[in-house]
Amino acid sequence: MGAIAATVGSAVGLGNIWRFPYEAGVHGGGAFLLVYVACVLLMGIPVIVAEFVIGRSTHKNVRGALRELAPRHKLHWFSYVCILASLMIISFYSVVCGWIVEYLQLSVRGLLHGHTPAEYEQMFADFVQNPWRCVLWTLLFLALNYVVLRRGLKRGIERVSNVLMPLLAVLLVVFCVNGLTLPGAERGVRFLFTPDFSQITPRVAIGAMGQAFFSLSLGLSCLLTYASYFKDSDSLVRNATIVGVLDTVVAILAGLMIFPAVFSYGMRPEAGPKLIFEVLPAIFEQMPGGPVWAVLLFALLFVASITSTISMSEISIAFFSEEWGMSRNRASILNTGIAMVLGTLCALSFGVLSEATVFGMTLFELFDYVSSNVLLPVGGIFFSLLVGWVLDRGLVRDQLTNHGTRTVRVMRPLVFCLRYVAPAAIVVIFLYGLLWR
Ligand code: PFF
């Protein structure tokens, strides 16, 4: 129960509640959701199983595991790709965690109340352009993340989140019910659930695939690391299915919380990363007891985000300490230091550094795009091919069936997915995106 709860804690985070609605909004709603769900089923859950097999069979970090499982192939270089992806993600992710901290303190001080939707839009714009506040909250969040990692408070946080994550789900349901009663809500529901097939473009396919990998914490060995703590009696296929399904349900709930309100208040679904920060305050405004809901939601989002940042930090910390022989404390300082430098630059991407672009993207956008849409799917290809083709079949079977003590009915389709479907689908989406941009 503990290991699976921690894994769900890693998967469920701002990726579901902040990133999913904004990506779905930018990419046409229903068309995006359809491709997203297909990606979770055909690539997501199989690749989760693949990472679980590698992690649990070796009980090691990514580099150690690759060295042990494929000693002849020198595949452990791939661990550098994982470290790079995890550092890029924590750098821009902690900026959004900083935004959550800002909105949490605003709501606690009762300042998220009594304004019009247009004023809330202005409030967010003023905030992200203020270099001091954004950077300060990002650094503060990373410092807190460091304290948790350093002090070994991780288990405590996980125990707390075992209670708070279900509460977050309940809260999302309350917000959905509230959203559905708004005038014009059905337009939001239609936006999310009615796919317009003509809208499935290369950009949408790449975006949905990247979102699936990001939201499931997949392709950068995060789940591999967590699975190295699984017990031999845990069912890997069942655990992977639980993570995939719960994570998707939370994302859809977040969509159902946001889009009815977006349409009801005449806001723009394609607003981008700022979407939930403009829409949520407008929702609280109209709900009875709004200020209290606001504090509760931002506090729970804060907990959801720290369980995710802990898990992404764990990748480089395990690597620095196990491979480079650093103490855990030094490894945590190195991870936090890199994240603080890059995080500061990402935080400034909305203000003073908004003109500093690479390929037309600010640093924040670049880190987000390259990690989610490129590095994580490449990781997906790597792990699925490794388990599908390179690893000993007996080892894979033993892991999936817990040494023959469990029957796994989906064994053949699963292995088929890992060998052919998942890698081929990722390659096809890449080519589709590259050739038809
Ligand atoms: N899956 C997390 C979320 O949805 O917020 C983000 C994440 C965590 C990505 C851990 C990658 C990772 F290694």
Image: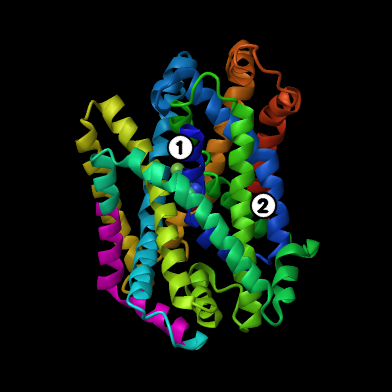
Q: Quadrant of residue 173?
A: bottom right
Is residue 329 in view from this perspective? yes
Is residue 24 in view from this perspective? no
Stretch in magenta: 119-143
Q: CA distance from mark 1 to mark 2?
A: 20 Å
Residue 234 against residue 296 in the figure, above or below:
above
Q: Which mark is residue 222?
A: 1
Residue 217 against residue 434 in the figure, above or below:
above
- Colour scheme employed for the rendering of this structure: rainbow
Question: Which residue is nearer to you in this view: 268 or 6?
Answer: 6
Q: Which residue is mark 2?
A: 36
Of mark 1 and mark 2, the one earlier in the sequence is 2
Residue 189 against residue 437 in the figure, above or below:
below
Residue 397 against residue 205 in the figure, above or below:
above
Beta carbon at label 1 within 8 Å of ligand 1: yes
Residue 30 magenta-highlighted? no
Quadrant where the image shows the C terminus:
bottom right
